[in-house]
Image: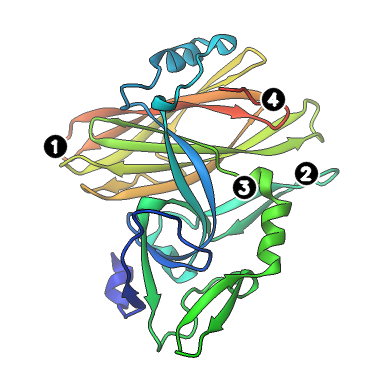
Amino acid sequence: KQWYQRRVGEVGKFTAPKVTGNYECGQLFLHKKLDYRGVVLFPWVARVFSRNNKAFPLLFDSKLKKGEVDDIPGFTKESYQTVIYYQVLLDFRDCPIVSQREGITFLGQNSDNKFYTIPGIDYISHEDVLPYEQSESIRDPIQHNLFQKFLDKRTDPSGVTSYHSTNMLHQFHEDNFDCLRLRDVHSQTTNGVKITVYSFFMGCRSETPTKEHWWRYSILMENVGDITVQLRERTWCIFSNADNKESVTGKGVVGQEPVLAPGQCFQYSSLVSLRSSAGHMWGTYLFEREDRKFINVSIPPFLLVSKVNEPQV
């Protein structure tokens, strides 16, 4: 990666990853898969539904694909894994090595129907956190315009520096709880490529003739196979509970056709709107392997639910 060729420097010393317990607010880390520097803001408890888990009810996916949303099965405790995810700030200096500048998008409330984006905020699973302590020579370990607003720097008598949440961070968490909260994560591995996806309800836009409900979703692609692959095409099936079904096919994602060597990842986010307050979507990625063979990779079905229409599953 060109970014590494331009500059490599010490940022700190690794500490032992936590096997039990959560990382505290202010914990500095490197992302195990996406390589960027970041700092933990606060945790979320999420249910991770893996289609490769034998206890996952296959009827859930088949019912959704048929549009039989009123008859989807519930989940047992064996059908998912409870995982801690963290809301984090990422270092703007590392954006060149991330597929895109990750961020969170909001929809203005009341009469304000504009979209607002705060760049440099991401979600990361507990197992992908590589914690470290900053070097004494590093003055500002994370370069982000919210770092000093969200975190208060403290140094104890022995000279150890730590970071703690500010009142602004508490207010940010409280004001935006509903659109920040991560509840369900869906994943599936097909033909050596793992897809992980989660979604968030943003709100409604009422200035259009038909009321639009908006969601944002994030996808992490990971090559867990032993051969390099390149994304060529995407196909989405988007189902609205108002009995509308739409298929969308396009080249690559977010204007890119990422190449993934074994162990490499690509992450991106996008938006989707429906005319009803609930729906679901699923899809397929078409990848080309380095031996010129093509493979289909499944995007597992996931629900699009609003605060006023949320199924109890």
Q: Position of residue 200 (x, y in %)?
A: 60, 39
Quick check: 283 left or right of 176? left
Q: Which residue is mark 1?
A: 291
Give whichever of discs 1 and 3 has the lower sequence position.
3
Foreground pick, 43 / 199: 43
Q: Which residue is mark 3?
A: 180
Identity, as a three-letter code, of the amino acid under mark 4: Asn
Q: Position of residue 221 (x, y in %)?
A: 35, 42
Q: Quadrant of residue 3?
A: bottom left
The correct choice, above or below, for 123 with respect to 41 in the image is: above
Q: Residues within 10 Å of mark 1 (few under 14, many from 20)?
A: few
The reply to whether dot 4 and dot 2 touch (C-beta < 8 Å) is no
Q: CA distance from mark 1 to mark 3?
A: 41 Å
Quick check: 226 left or right of 175? left
Q: Which residue is mark 2?
A: 113
**Foreground: disc 3 or disc 2:** 3
The correct choice, above or below, for 30 with respect to 116 in the image is: below
Foreground pick, 295 / 81: 81
Q: Quadrant of the C terminus?
A: top right
**Foreground: disc 1 or disc 2:** 2
